[in-house]
Image (cartoon, helix red, strand yellow):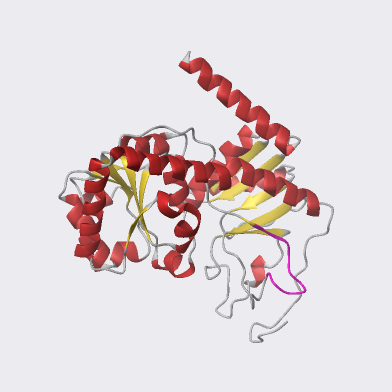
Amino acid sequence: MYLLFQLLSVLFAVLFFAEADGGERHIAITSHKAWKGEHSLAHRIQHAADRLGWKADLHAGEAVREIYSKQYDFVIHLVPGIALHPTAKNYLAIFDPYNHYFEASGYLKMEYRFYDGYLLTYEPEVGDKNFLNRYSPPYLSWYPTVYDVAYKKVNPKHLFYICSTWGNRRNDSRYQTLLNSLEKVGYARFYGDAKVGDQYPKSFRGPIPFMGDYLYKTIQEAGIYLLLHSEFHLKYGLPSGRIFEAAASSAVILSDNNAFIKEHFGDSVLYIDVAASGENMFEQVERHMRWIRSHKKQAVSMAKRSHAIFKEKFLLEMQMIRLGEFHDRIKGSARVKVPEFTTTSETY
């Protein structure tokens, strides 16, 4: 009976999203296997597109050459260095305003100025040199989010954490102190690159596959998610994909004071002051773990609220539908020609 209910739920979701979108599309996603976050998102986009009734091809590594021999409605580019499709609309995802797509002056590098549209995780501010001016190319709010994962009541026993291989979380001695302390307590479960196992042999459980629902099931088995953003995410209040993975999985979330998390997820999350020492951060985690154990019902209720917020505001299927509408508005227009400008000038 339960299996029948699940099958009917999936069927309903597929029909609902397909009706909401209004038709089949054929899209492509370009990625690179070495860019683990982007490549994971590429798989999620492909899965969400399939649920919408779209056909979605993922091109990465050597397979990316195949993109030019096929016809698409549009292409989502998640990584740099891949040429524009000659006939489809090309949309470039940019996850922050200061990454490798930009020159030191703040302008988009020349090779990134000629996309048909841009998918921005950040909101351009007054003075933005690329998206808030009279030559502004079209852009859409875009998050590295997750497709619909059914709510599951978790048993919060273990602390799930993906060890980062980049940013201050890897090199900052305070974070090293925190993780070294968690290695000793017995409730931590670390995942990520295999070399992490050399540092944390007691807590390390292995890498997480990109495809399928293994990640979400693994988070659900642990029940508690530790979310630590890079210093750049914190400085500019930008989310990584981790908050969406955690909320989609129905986990109790322990997060740093990222402004995006506080604004959108509020008191459904337990917070950690990461400006503190490593020892103090560990003490904060310990206090949260004790509270969760002694207030399990309240903790699970918080996790359920986080999941509801995710489904209401950040579902990947709905984001894809908005992208389809965005595409329909501009598909008849010529490719945007951003005017030539000097990178030393402060105005166009």
Compare residues 207 and 16 and report the one nearer the observer.
16
Q: Is residue 68 visible?
A: no
Quarter of the figure that contains the C terminus:
bottom right
Q: Left or right: where does residue 149 sit relative to residue 13?
A: left
Residue 201 versus residue 11 in the image, above or below: below
Magenta stretch secondary structure, dominant: loop
Compare residues 298 and 15 and report the one nearer the observer.
298
Q: Left or right: where does residue 333 sit relative to residue 246?
A: right
At 64% across and 39% down in the image, what residue appears? 56
Q: Left or right: where does residue 229 sit relative to residue 179?
A: right
Residue 69 versus residue 124 in the image, above or below: above
Q: Position of residue 224 (x, y in %)?
A: 32, 43
The magenta stretch spans residue 137: yes
Q: Left or right: where does residue 108 sit relative to residue 276?
A: right
Name the outermost residue toward the left.
Answer: 184
Among the 4 quarters of the image, the one containing residue 229: bottom left
Highlighted range, magenta: 131-140
The magenta stretch spans residue 74: no
Q: Position of residue 48 (x, y in %)?
A: 59, 38
Q: Position of residue 61 (x, y in %)?
A: 53, 48
Compare residues 279 and 131 and report the one nearer the observer.
279
At 69% across and 83% down in the image, what residue appears? 342
